[in-house]
Amino acid sequence: MQKFQLNDIFWTFQGEGYNAGNRALFVRMPHCNLNCSWCDTEYDSKSEFTNEQITEFAIYEKARFAVITGGEPLQNKETPIIARLLQGHGFLIATETNGTMPPVGGIDWFTCSPKRDAAYKIHRLLWPLVNEFKYVVDDDFDFSILDRHTNRIGQRSDVKLYLSPEFTKMKENLCKIQNFVKEHPEWRISLQTHKWMGIQ
């Protein structure tokens, strides 16, 4: 029997990005290397779960899509173990990372949401693996970072590009995104629909 420290595990719907609308098992890992001012996650609390408890909870529903998030899941040594545990039961594994850590095994879909607190840095080994980039646009967001990052992405037509308005000032931030996307149609708007639905 293996034991893991998780912040939370729950069934919900993916609320944003490319996989929005999918029924999803969320596995929230504790701890983060950043401290973003508008973070909506209490990631430092944790509880112990066995591999049997995780498996029983995971296969209770029919969907086989899981999101390992945090905190920062790529800094947690248990993330690849949990990913492979769920893959053994037919799950496709997505993760949501701030991009500062190197990739780990067992991940099928990387969502990278670079943060100002890390100067929007992305680990060099993560760049070629990212499936979708998602930037949170707030009061002080510098849109020039997007040009620098899209130049680094190059001609990868498979990469999805999203801008998400910071929720507490939705109207103002959404307006800025709309104006940007008019001139840069390769980008899409991603809204946090789970908050409107009143779910985790």
Image: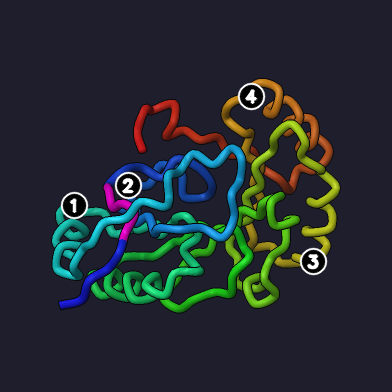
Q: Nearer the viewer, mark 1 or mark 4?
A: 4
| Badge 1 element | loop
Give the residue pinned by disc 2: 23
Identity of the residue drawn at 36% across and 42% down:
13
Q: Which residue matches tag 3? A: 152
Magenta-colored span: 6-10
> Which residue carries the number 4 mark?
169
Mark 3 and mark 4: Cα distance apart in space = 30 Å
Residue type, numbered disc 2:
Arg
Name the residue: 30% across, 64% down: 5
Place of residue 19 in the rendered image (x, y in percent of width and height, measured from the top left): 46, 50
Colouring method of the image: rainbow
Give the overall secondary structure of the magenta segment.
strand
Q: Distance between the residues labelled 3 and 2?
A: 32 Å
Quarter location, residue 200:
top left
Reading the image, the residue beneath label 1 is 61
Counting residues from the start of the chain, the first of labels 4 and 2 encountered is 2
